[in-house]
Image: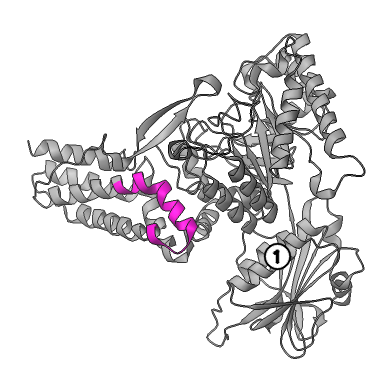
């Protein structure tokens, strides 16, 4: 392997090598290996500069302790101990000076990118590790801890490698897109507080920073938008996603602890542009104040799905009110004497026209042109040309021309509110095929231009949505490095851990509506053998047994020590149980037995609640999961009919 020596630093030599020592997601912009290994075991001393906030220090301690390391803190590195230095570029603090001593490049901080930072792992003369994370600010340093967390998962593939020894390395990293995360804006049961908080923790591990809450079926977001959240709810209300004030306060607290901006959005509907309603801004401001007391520090306004205005007076009124609302926020919470912890970030706004192909080009130009008077710091969202468009620079450029500046992208992926009985558990491009509203051949661009924000509207199943979320985070961080298949393969252990990742890898093609190709192949072979009068069910039975075995293994998530595993099981349970039941019955029939037929439509084990509608139109119904509905379910029905 060709190596180029760059700099001698203690016992580590910077080298450029073909193989990178660590597998990290999102994929870092640059990973440079160094010769040598550093010992990282026992106790690590955390040294944080004054500009590093308490949340970042707490996260550093959490990462170390979760990997079996003891933690101490000091103002300077400790001799004879492993050290973790956290700092800010240009601060002249201890970490900044160490970067200069190591002769590390600062070029990354000059790039027009986001969350810029560097991470260096070297070793002192005694072989102990010295980890340095230097960010453009404390939030960027926090992102570096996500890389360190995955580095600590490293397992040597060298037979001579010792436990607790890590290859020396330097990372230069940044995000291509500033705001990365989730918009909980689907029609369906809102996520529970437990799922939302678990998503925050997952997002922190993979460098996401934005979570906008606009659950369509939350009445206090839409129908009762002007009223305060309740202090208590019934078990039935909790089952369908209601939240209390204490729950929201807890959610906001976890958002702050994970550096995920929890943006609470209000949906006043047509009231926002009703010229006869002179109190709407007062009501919105009052509700925002209620949410601020609960810990929310960023807000959104939704006026989507209530009809697109076209007259100039209404368009102007909407823009003027949005501008005034931002002014009120700044006047109330962003005064020069305000405490930093109380300040509020700019508004996020989802307009009536978010898919610009709904109207003629001239009307779209007038609509977005009216919003050009709104302060540019207000984030205005689109879904592209269509509701289900995949992010692309062309659509962004069109709206930029109308609006006069970049727009944010609300991506309806892997949203299933139009396909509520389906799960999208495969890689991104397979999901594009499975989701009937997304262009089957759509692909992500190697350089997405024209948006500071890429947030996805996920499935009603928040834990299962992590599979897709992982790859979106991977893409949003590093557009060019995104590899669809590799990213999906990496998502599985990230979501359910290494123990269950192979099982999920087996089941993912069957939990979806469209069965695995392997099953389709063996089913065709079996049916052909039946038509020839020489039934050969062996291959099909073997395939179905592997499915049943994987389902049984996946049941272990139900009693896992990890809360996220248990939450994942609850999400996938109706599909998992139905898949197992269908496969088990099919095996029995293929082997000549006549078992009791599984109720494929009304079995409560296969059902889940679904909310539909917005505002006054919210209603509750029950749906039945549809795993393997293209091949396995028709096979089972065919086997039953053959026995009549």
The image shows residue 477, relative to residue 142, as above or below, that is above
Residue where numbered disc 1 is placed: 58
Q: Quadrant of the C terminus?
A: top left
Residue 229: image x %, image y %?
61, 34
- Report the residue that reaches farthest toward the front: 231
State whether residue 411 appears in this view: yes
Q: Is residue 540 left or right of residue 573?
A: left
Q: Is residue 572 magenta?
A: yes
Q: Tell me what residue is drawn at x 67 percent, y 64 percent.
A: 147
Q: Label the magenta part by its dominant secondary structure.
A: helix
Colour pattern of the rendering: one colour
Q: Secondary structure at mark 1?
A: helix
Q: Tell me what residue is drawn at x 47 percent, y 48 percent.
A: 464
Q: Residues within 10 Å of mark 1 (few under 14, many from 20)?
A: few
**Quadrant of the rendered image containing residue 626:** top left
**Stretch in magenta:** 558-577
């Amino acid at each position: 392997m060709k190596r180029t020596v760059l700099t001698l630093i203690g016992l580590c030599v910077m080298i450029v090598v073909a193989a990178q020592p660590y597998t990290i997601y999102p994929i870092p912009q640059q990973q440079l290996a160094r010769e040598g290994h550093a010992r990282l075991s026992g106790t690590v001393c955390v040294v944080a500069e004054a500009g590093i906030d308490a949340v970042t220090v707490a996260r550093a301690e959490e990462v170390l302790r979760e990997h079996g390391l003891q933690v101490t803190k000091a103002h300077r590195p400790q001799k004879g101990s492993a050290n973790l230095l956290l700092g800010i570029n240009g601060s002249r603090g201890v970490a900044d000076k160490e970067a200069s001593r190591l002769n590390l490049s600062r070029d990354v901080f000059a790039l027009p990118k986001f969350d810029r930072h560097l991470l260096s792992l070297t070793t002192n003369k005694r072989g102990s590790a010295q980890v340095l994370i230097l960010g453009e600010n404390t939030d960027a340093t926090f992102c570096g801890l996500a890389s360190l967390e995955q580095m600590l998962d490293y397992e040597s593939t060298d037979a001579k490698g010792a436990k607790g020894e890590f290859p020396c390395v330097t990372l230069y990293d940044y995000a291509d897109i500033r705001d990365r995360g989730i918009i909980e804006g689907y029609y369906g049961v809102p996520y529970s507080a437990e799922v939302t908080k678990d998503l925050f923790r997952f997002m922190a591990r993979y460098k996401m920073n934005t979570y906008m809450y606009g659950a369509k079926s939350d009445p206090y977001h839409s129908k009762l938008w002007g009223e305060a959240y309740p202090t208590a709810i019934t078990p039935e209300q909790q089952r369908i996603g209601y939240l209390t004030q204490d729950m929201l306060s807890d959610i906001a607290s976890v958002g702050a602890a994970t550096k995920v901006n929890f943006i609470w959005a209000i949906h006043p509907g047509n009231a926002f542009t009703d010229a006869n309603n002179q109190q709407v801004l007062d009501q919105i401001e009052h509700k925002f104040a209620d949410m601020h007391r609960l810990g929310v520090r960023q807000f959104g306004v939704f006026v989507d799905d209530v009809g697109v205005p076209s007259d100039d007076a209404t368009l102007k009124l909407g823009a003027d009110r949005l501008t005034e609302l931002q002014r009120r926020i700044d006047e109330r919470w962003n005064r020069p004497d305000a405490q930093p912890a109380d300040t509020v970030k700019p508004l996020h706004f989802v307009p009536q026209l978010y898919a610009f192909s709904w109207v003629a080009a001239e009307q779209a130009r007038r609509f977005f042109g009216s919003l050009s008077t709104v302060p540019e710091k207000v984030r205005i969202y689109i879904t592209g040309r269509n509701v289900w468009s995949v992010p692309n620079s062309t659509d962004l450029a069109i709206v930029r021309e109308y609006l006069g500046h970049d727009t944010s992208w609300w991506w309806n992926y892997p949203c299933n509110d139009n396909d509520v009985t389906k799960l999208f558990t495969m890689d991104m491009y397979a999901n594009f095929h499975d989701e009937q509203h997304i262009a089957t051949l759509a692909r992500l661009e190697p350089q997405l231009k024209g948006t500071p924000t890429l947030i996805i509207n996920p499935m009603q199943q928040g834990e299962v949505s992590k599979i897709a979320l992982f790859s979106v985070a991977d893409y949003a961080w590093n557009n060019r490095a995104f590899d669809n298949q590799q990213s999906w393969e990496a998502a599985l252990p990230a979501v359910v851990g290494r123990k269950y990742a192979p099982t999920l890898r087996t089941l993912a093609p069957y939990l979806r509506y469209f069965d695995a190709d392997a099953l389709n192949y063996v089913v065709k072979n079996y049916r052909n053998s039946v038509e020839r009068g020489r039934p050969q069910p062996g291959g099909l039975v073997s395939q179905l047994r592997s499915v049943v075995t994987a389902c049984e293994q996946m049941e272990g998530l139900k009693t896992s020590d990890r809360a996220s595993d248990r939450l994942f099981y609850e999400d996938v349970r109706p599909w998992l149980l139905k898949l197992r039941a269908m496969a088990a019955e099919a095996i029995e029939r293929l082997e000549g037995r006549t078992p009791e037929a599984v109720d494929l439509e009304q079995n409560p084990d296969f059902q889940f609640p679904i909310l539909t509608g917005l505002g006054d139109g919210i209603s509750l119904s029950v749906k039945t999961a549809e795993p393997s509905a293209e091949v396995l379910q028709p096979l089972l029905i065919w086997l039953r009919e053959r026995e009549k």
